[in-house]
Image: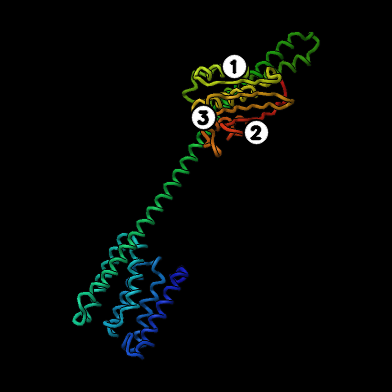
């Protein structure tokens, strides 16, 4: 109990003990202070006040000990003149039981304070006026109600913090679910890209095998192995895709788009009243299908976000190939943002697709105004 006491509580107890010692040992010399046998008074006052070091960890026991010590001082000494320091200690204990104890213990503490006050005042009730009785009672009542309000405020702060933590956990789970859903969608689309490539390899291997001369047995067997391995790879990929499918995928995902359909995307956006400027440069027709698909999805999601959120009148779409890099930029003239946007499913999908190709993605305020989406995708080889 003493080891867990706060330094502030030790300082409080030390100050009260110093005041109590002054009342017991110094003031009686001047015919004031706390009359009575000094050693017992010092012992009981020390017990009553030292209990306050546990006022936050064990508030109800600390209050009970303080009350008992106060009553003992009132019995041994003169209760009519020995109340200042002990009343101050009782005020602290009363506040503490209301502020730090449970609701049940706070009510028990209030009952203990009332009982202690009645007993203590009854020791010299005949010598006191109604004001002498009411003033300490009012102070004790005020201390309890203040402590109770502090307890309620602390509970509200804890509930708010818990609610904020719950919202943060929920948001993180939703974000992880969105990432998983986007990865599943990307995996389904890339399956079709890879499956098409493997099928083409198998067809070409079969065509090449049929052109071989009868004596080219080794080449014949090698091409047969290529065809067989291609079929097996397609079967394995189909089984893997079955794990990723959901009920909404039963009708398939349809033909996969490429950069030849960017004009159609722009036309759809223009039909909503948005001015779309396309700036396409470089040899894009021989880009790998996976890169084309990623570029198309980035432009698609960016245009969708512009229509939904940007409050823009125009958007500039730039797709440029230079060397082994494909640069994509979608910049609108809308209201823009002042910080990193909250990731929605569209932005999550962009990031996941760019990460697959070891590219880079920026989403945020444009150079002058509006919102900007820009991506750099490495091109490791043409079709």
Tags 1 and 3 in contact by the CB under 8 Å rule? no
Q: On the picture, is 367 further left or further right than 21?
A: right
Q: Quadrant of the C terminus?
A: top right
Provide the residue designation for mark 2: 360
Distance Cα–Cα, label 3 vs label 2: 23 Å
Q: What label sits on residue 296 in the rendered view?
A: none
Percent coordinates x, y for residue 163 in the rendering: 42, 47
Q: Is residue 320 visible?
A: yes
Q: Quadrant of residue 48?
A: bottom left
Q: What label sits on residue 310 in the rendered view?
A: 3
Going 32% across and 85% down the picture, which residue do you hit? 34
Is 71 rendered above or below residue 366? Answer: below
Tags 2 and 1 in contact by the CB under 8 Å rule? no
Secondary structure at badge 3 equals: helix
Percent coordinates x, y for residue 188 in the rendering: 56, 24
Distance Cα–Cα, label 2 vs label 1: 24 Å
Is 158 rendered above or below residue 171? Answer: below
Q: Quadrant of residue 355?
A: top right
Q: Dot 3, how many residues are within 10 Å of its Cα: few (below 14), some (14-19), or many (20+)? A: many
Which residue occupies the extreme right position in the image? Answer: 215
Q: Earlier in the sequence, mark 2 or mark 1?
A: 1
Q: Is residue 194 visible?
A: no
Percent coordinates x, y for residue 260 in the rendering: 62, 16
Distance Cα–Cα, label 1 vs label 3: 21 Å
């Amino acid at each position: 109990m003493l080891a867990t006491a706060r330094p502030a509580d030790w300082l409080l107890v030390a100050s009260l003990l110093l005041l109590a010692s002054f009342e017991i040992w110094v003031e009686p010399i001047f015919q004031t202070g706390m009359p009575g046998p000094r050693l017992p008074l010092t012992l009981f006052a020390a017990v009553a006040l030292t209990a306050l070091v546990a006022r936050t960890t064990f508030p109800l026991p600390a209050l009970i000990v303080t009350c008992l010590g106060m009553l003992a001082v009132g019995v041994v000494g003169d209760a009519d003149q020995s109340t200042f320091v002990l009343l101050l200690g009782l005020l602290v204990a009363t506040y503490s039981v209301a502020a730090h104890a449970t609701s049940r213990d706070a009510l028990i503490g209030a009952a203990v304070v009332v009982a202690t006050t009645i007993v203590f005042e009854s020791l010299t009730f005949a010598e006191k006026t109604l004001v002498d009785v009411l003033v300490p009672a009012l102070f004790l009542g005020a201390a309890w109600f203040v402590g109770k309000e502090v307890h309620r405020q602390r509970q509200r702060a804890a509930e708010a913090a818990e609610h904020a933590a719950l919202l943060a956990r929920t948001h993180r789970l939703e974000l992880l679910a969105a990432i998983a859903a986007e990865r599943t969608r990307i995996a389904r689309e890339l399956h079709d890209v890879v499956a098409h490539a493997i099928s083409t390899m198998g067809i070409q291997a079969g065509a090449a095998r049929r052109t071989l001369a009868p004596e080219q047995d080794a080449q014949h067997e090698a091409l047969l192995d290529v065809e067989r391995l291609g079929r097996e790879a397609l079967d394995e990929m189909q089984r893997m895709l079955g794990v990723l499918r959901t009920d909404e995928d039963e009708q398939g995902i349809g033909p996969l788009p490429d950069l030849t359909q960017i004009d159609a995307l722009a036309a759809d956006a223009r039909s909503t009243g948005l001015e779309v400027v396309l700036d396409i440069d470089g040899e894009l027709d021989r880009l790998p299908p996976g890169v084309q698909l990623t570029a198309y999805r980035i432009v698609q999601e960016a245009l969708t976000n512009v229509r939904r959120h940007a409050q823009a009148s125009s958007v500039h779409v730039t797709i440029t190939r230079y060397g082994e890099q494909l640069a994509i930029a979608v910049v609108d003239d809308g209201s823009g943002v002042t910080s990193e946007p909250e990731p929605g499913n569209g932005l999550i999908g962009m990031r996941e697709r760019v990460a697959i190709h070891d590219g880079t993605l920026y989403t945020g305020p444009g150079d002058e105004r509006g919102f900007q989406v820009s991506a750099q995708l490495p091109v490791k080889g043409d079709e």
